[in-house]
Image (cartoon, coloured by chain):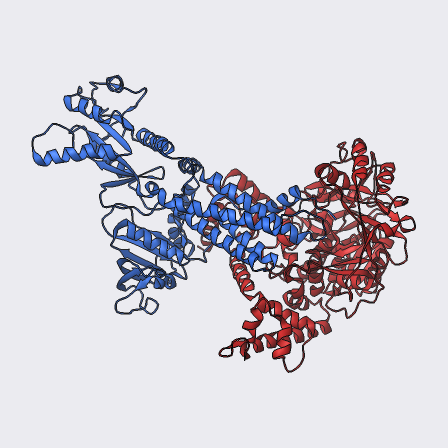
Amino acid sequence: MFIDDTIAAISTPLGEGGIGIVRLSGKDSIKIAEKIFISPKNKSLNNSKSHRIIYGYIKDPKTDKEIDEVLITIMRSPYSYTREDVVEINCHGGMTALRKTLELILKQGARLAEPGEFTKRAFINGRIDLSQAEAVLDLIRSKTDESRRIAIEQLQGGLSEKITALRDRLTEVCAHVEAYIDFPEDEIETASIKAVLESMKDIGREFHALLKTYDEARFFREGLSTAIVGSPNVGKSSLLNALLKKDRAIVTEYPGTTRDVIEEYLNINGLPLRIMDTAGIRDVQDIAEKEGVKRSLLSIENADIVIAMFDCSELLKEEDFEVIQKVKDRNTIFVLNKSDLQSAIDRNSISSLVPRPSPSILNISATRGDGLEELKDIIFESCLKNWKEEREGVVITNLRHKTAIEKAKTSLERAISALLENQPLEILALELRDSLDRLGEIVGAITTEDILNKIFTDFCIGK
Amino acid sequence: MYKDRDYDVIVIGAGHAGCEAALASARTGFSTCLFTMNLDTIAQMSCNPAIGGLAKGHLVREIDALGGEMAKVTDKTGIQFRMLNMSKGPAVWSLRAQTDRVLYRLEMRRVIEAQENLDVKQALVEEILVEDVKIKGVLTSLGIFYGTKAVIVTTGTFLKGLIHIGLENFSAGRAGEFPSVGLSDSLRELGLNMGRLKTGTPPRLDAKTIDFSKTEPQYGDDPPLPFSHSTEKITNPQLPCYITHTNSETHRIILDNLDRSPLYSGKIKGIGARYCPSIEDKVVRFAERERHQVFLEPEGLETKEYYANGIPTSLPYDVQVKFVRTIPGLEEVEIMRPGYAIEYDFVFPTQLKHNLETKIIDGLFLAGQINGTSGYEEAAAQGIMAGINASLKLQGREPLILGRHEAYIGVLIDDLITKGTNEPYRMFTSRAEYRLLLRHDNADLRLMNKGHEIGLLDNALYQRFLGKKSLINEELERLKKTRIKYDDPNKSESLEQLLKRPEITYKFIDEHSPPDKPLITEIKRQVEIQVKYNGYIIRQMAMAEKLKKVEGKRIPENFDYVTVNGLSKEVLSKLQEVRPANLGQASRIPGITPAAISLLMVAIERLRRERRA
């Protein structure tokens, strides 16, 4: 929240070629980068001059495993974008390397930057001018956009309820310890040390289980695969371009994507999509083209969502019927393009051919941009449905959440050892409060007032 | 209207807040007048005859370190001293004392009367006079006017006090004393928003009619440890308290008579404290409890009156008699004074600045129960701070604002003015984020410099403190430098490292490598705590450093929050109500999100640059 720590983020958009940049800003940024950087010529970042490029490797200091070959630039305060010490790491190994590098940096004590935070710092530190401040405000504001937050939360399957429940259990443990400290003269029946220990261990196990889901929920970071299919010249590429024009994915909260096989990224309401523009489906003789069609069909099978496109200015052709055949059992959105032209077919022409009730069908004009917002909403809804059908339970999808839970877990573990080592109770309380504060970063803080409420509800206090 | 003389500072109300406020102002050189409705009840302990307890004991030592009086008076009039929480860590040890109620008020009156620059007058102040939102003077019920530059209001439960005993109620400031009605209206007319709180007391019993053999005595520590840094020795005779319990019969009688309880019949409108519930409340809310503790506390050395701590009640007198007599040891008991509940007006404390001055009237300070707190210690702590800050204001100096990392007093005042309160506010150690820094044993190290700088702290005491401080530092240095071989013959370790081990105490140092000059216990203890908890202390200090940085980001006093785009309605109205002094305080207002703080930070920076441009 305040400018005294070091922040980091991947600062290049997704899907923009092979190189990506991880950027750090803050007083410890050089120190942090140093910890994960190896120079073949034994150059130290700390001693290097400002604005020089240094070649080397990113290494996991724990496992000594090499992550990527990189170029590092150091920009010393005040000669940087934020006027703080800034380090930029140019990674070459694609999204996986970028993500891994960022995670290593966060483990060394940097904090994941909030949207707009580099710019905010630049402003606060007097680097950018007044007119740019408004844009900063907008950025901060967009983060608090309630509807978007709720939508994402739904996708996460009630992560916030889960964390809230854990936080409340931890609050209860904390209340028992605090009551025992603050009311030594009251005959209160606080939980036994053994019960407190059991609760803490149990909450610890839950943290552990939650953290494991981060790897399971890859698609939130790598994107739901979405295939645009249709016969040639219905406007598939125009649609892709129209969508990309406005909403080309920007890496903020969902870093980490394998980019090997993917065409383009799109960000819809904070949800990353991998969009595959496929070859037009038709009966072909040419071997190369045959291969293209084969891949199109394969991508339909692998896609989480299929957008089947038709040209509504023409009657349905043989190929169109074939497309419908291929996609009718998939999670499909039917799109009638070229709504700006005279219509030859309408929704009924499609729905009569699809054996399921009320399929998603809509009219758009990719060139004029009509119907695109509606399409995005439908894609979003569709993802939501898809996700809910596939699995139950809670997942962590967001690196910020993951980091917070990891820290909460560490503090809880320290609390457990404080208890086992017979440390004074106020030390135990300190670690528990620390753990609570970390969870508070995700679901809102627990205040002293909340803990006192719990104490006064559960215990009869009042000498 | 008769115009009497002018004073620099006028304090209204001579309770625990008022006495400290008046002394602080007079001792820093300002002519001060302390008004009380009754000279015979100066520093009256309206509730239980005890000072200190968890977190409250910390407050008392902090008041002492600043140069206040409460600790000294307690040491002189205390009849039982106990260090609580000795089984836990040193940060949450806390001293508590039973005092002789009569001796306490006489001793405080002696100090007040002996104080240079301080007049004390019996009069009922009815009105505070203000000109151009600046204090002008006060007017008493006899129409006498006193001009002044600063007024500190410390009226406790007296503002429109209403006592309930059963369904009967009558206006009173305390049992047997008049309420103050005019002053409450005067404050309201000045524009202050006020609410209503409730508190209660238990019946006082006649020891002649108590069978103490059926109770369990609770003795104080021997030797008793004093509160004040200046007290050498406690000299009063020491008395025990006695513990007994309620039982199912007690509870049945209470439940059968709930319809005659003003609390349960809805007669009482004020909000009571959850940590100090009436026995009616305990029995109803914790029905599963088979018994509740009753502490029989002596009211003094020369009286038979005992305070039945644990059973505050507003039930009718006949029910009080009936249920009390079901308690072991109290079968034949005679009630000397019945328990009662009292409702009173308080000022929502979010209308105050950190120096305890109201935001709307220049020179008007409020301290104590009027700000929604409960407890003598909380009152005295605010009293001394209001006195100090009125004095600093008249000197044209910066106010003394203690940080949350510096003192429980800082936590107390910041909580009140930032979060407000809707029940009588009491201090708990859990309210302090920096609990390991705010120990009772280091109150002098934390605050004596400030007490000295303000000119409140006795110079001899300050010199002694400096000596102690340098001895502590020298010993810490020595422990760091001196290395010995202990359990591993091949490895030498510093005394500091050894002392960090859980099983090793300072006694080990004394046995293996004592300092050239033997140290007093207090210093050994301090060194041991600082070494053992060093890691945690450093961690909390690092947190405190962060806090200080944000507190440094000041919000202009007349800042218009409406100009900040993107604040939710709720956040906006809270910011407008509290008008925080800096971003740190803003972030502690309940319901203020980190995103809102971000917006505020940018908006303030923008304003600053616009002004500069």
Q: Residue furthest bottom?
A: B516
Q: Which of the 4 quarters of the picture holds residue B381?
A: bottom right
Q: Is B110 situated left or right of B595 in this image?
A: right
At horizontal 55% and vertical 62% (from top left) the residue drawn is B536
Counting the numbered discs, the total is: 0
Q: Which of the 4 quarters of the picture holds residue B180?
A: top right
- List x then y, in percent, for residue B475: 61, 76
At horizontal 39% and vertical 36% (from top left) the residue drawn is A155
Whether residue B390 can be seen here = no
- List x then y, in percent, for residue B560: 53, 45
- List x then y, in percent, for residue B294: 79, 47
Q: Is B223 situated left or right of A325 in this image?
A: right
Q: Is B242 situated left or right of B510 in this image?
A: right
Q: The chain shown in blue is which? A: A
Q: Which residue lies furthest to the right in this view?
A: B208
Q: The chain shown in red is which? A: B
Whether residue B210 can be seen here = yes
Above or below, A33 against A145 in this view is below
Above or below, B166 against B552 in this view is above
Q: Is B596 situated left or right of A178 in this image?
A: left
- List x then y, in percent, for residue A440: 50, 47
Q: Nearer the viewer, residue B47 or B536?
A: B536
